[in-house]
Image (spheres, grey):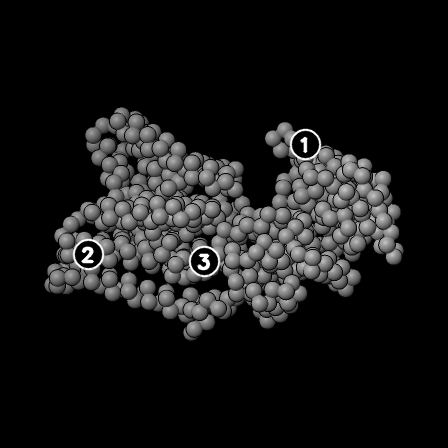
Amino acid sequence: MSDAVSPSRPLARLNPLKDQRLWALGVALLGASALFVFWGGAWRSAYILELRVVKLAGLLCVGSAIGVATVLFQTLTNNRILTPTIMGFDALFLLMKTILVFVAGVLALPVLGATPTFLADTTVMILATLAIFAAVLRRARHDIQLLVLVGVIFGLLFRTLAGFLQRLLDPSQFAIVQADMFATFSGMDQRSLAVAAMVMACFFLWLASRYAVLDVMALGRDQARALGVPYDRLQLQILAAIAALVSVSTALVGPLAFLGLLVTALTHALMRSHRHGLLLPAASLISCLILVVGQTVFERVFSLNSSLAVVIEFCGGLLFLFLLARGHIK
Amino acid sequence: MIEISNLSYSIAGQQILDGINTHLQRNQITALIGPNGAGKSTLLGAIGRQVDINTGQIKIDGEDLQNITPQDQARLMAIVAQHLHVGSRIRVVDLLGFGRWPHAKGRLGPQDHFIIQSALAQFDLTDLENRFLDELSGGQRQRAFLAMAHAQDADWLLLDEPLNNLDLKHGRSLMAHLRQMVSEKSKSVVVVLHDLNFTLAWADQIVAMRDGQVVFAGPTTTVATSEALSDLYQTPIELLNLNGHFFAQYHR
């Protein structure tokens, strides 16, 4: 069992199921989840149990979506400090959502149910991401400073455009958009949660067969292509996956800018490996663990409802500044 | 044989390659030489499909490069670029493992491990195999990438200024190693060289470039003359014959 754990045996056949660190994370997450669900004798009330299980499922969805999306994004950009949110992915999602609501209002389309709305949002988001970020990545990949700058400007542009359109919406339509604008972990819709989980499951299955080629892609475009990896095609597919995952988490809880950064920093510190077969599960477990433990502490111990997002953003933001100051942008 | 016909490449209005017509022979060490900005690296990149050419054609053994799948190409040629940068933190031995990707797709068998170990030994890296790439010196990292290309075990080896960071010993052993691969394993090597003396000592063929065009090409012994080289680099170069070996004297 020790071969996957000890970093001194590289090249060993990868088996995530044999990695003790992943098991430890899994057990910790299981414990935290049980604590979250059963705290204060919740088993006595089926109603409370159901509420909590739905919320837990939401946290797990969002956690793994953000963890995986961030690792993938950092692989594509060859960089340890960028996250999809820093590049304005969530702002793009909100813009697309606003546009959809706006257009639906103008054309007087009937209000769709949660499921079709969610699917429409995600599809539009994937298309918009491919159109915008595929072009940006192709031109600016070698220049991280430029990439960050473009991301910040795009984020601002998307946010401002969305803000402008939101001003034109009538109050009831605005309420639809507003639900996605701020990060909250309460009041997740059960049906969109189920759809989100299904969308994610599809992308995770697709990824599970490709984790080895991701290791090669992390070498960079030229190296990967020289080794026979169809880099550009895979890049598009992975961008689509990232867009879908960001849509899932933004639709469920709202934008979380720095959670991904926090998660990948912890993941790399813990795993000390370049292999996505280890990095991806570790990142999603750590991400879920942060959310579930954080939510338990805030909801049950401090009886606060909406401050978890703030605290995560605060810690993540500090880490971002710390990494910047240490010169980890490369 | 690699045949290059009417190859042109321009970027941002700048003509980098301008109607290149030449061929690179199998089972030879071919040196690409020429002053800075001649387009040597771009030509190498075009052959390795790292730059997308505007016009012209590259054929390998009669097959148009465009018709070769990336997977087949990776088994056909290995390329080591001039600037080696890897974003992720990986170990030397893992890097070599990637060299086996075109053959093993991440599932390394005993044969792959054997090739990796012998590549480590060939490039004097066995002591460094568990070091991270960003903990290595420039020359050591260069050797790690060269070893990875070796492990890739392709017919063609395209190297862009491989001597750049290497000390005398490793520079010489690299060239000897390339010679051995050509003569014993019938590989073919195309290498961008700046050191004329290494070129004269090891290259079978020379393709000399300037301003995106081929100035002269052919067997080293016939085309490498004092006049041709002086003209190519626009600087006086004298060839000295020392015990049957030619040395370029251009330092002062």
The kind of residue tagged 1 is: Gln
Residue at figure coordinates x 55%, y 58% from the top left: B136
Q: Inspect the image, locate mark 3, and give the three-letter code of the amino acid beneath it.
A: His
The reply to whether the C-beta atoms of the residues labelled 1 and 2 are less than 8 Å apart is: no
Judged from the image, the secondary structure of the residue bearing numbered disc 3 is helix
Q: CA distance from mark 1 to mark 2?
A: 63 Å
Residue B144 placement (x, y as % from top left): 60, 59
Category of crowding for the residue at label 1, using alpha-carbon neighbours closer than 10 angstroms: few (below 14), some (14–19), many (at least 20)? some
Q: Relative to the observer, which residue lies in front, B55 or B251?
A: B251
User: Disc 3 marks which residue?
Assistant: A276
> Which residue is drawn at the image coordinates 88% and 55% (left, top)?
B244
Residue A123 pos. (x, y %): 39, 41
Please tell me whether residue A30 is drawn above or below residue A213 in the rendered image.
below
Give the camera-side residue of A270 and A73: A270
Please indicate whether residue A268 sits to the left or right of residue B203 in the image.
Answer: left
Q: List x then y, in percent, for residue A309.
A: 25, 47
Chain letter belonging to callout 1 = B
* Depth order, front residue of B219/A164: B219
Number of numbered discs visible in the structure rendering: 3
Residue where numbered disc 2 is placed: A297
Q: CA distance from mark 3 to mark 2?
A: 31 Å
Nearer to the camera, B241 or B42: B241
Can residue A129 be seen here? no
Q: Chain of mark 3?
A: A
Reading the image, the residue beneath label 1 is: B15
Could you confirm whether marks 1 and 2 are on the same chain?
A: no
Task: For mark 2, give the secondary structure.
Answer: helix
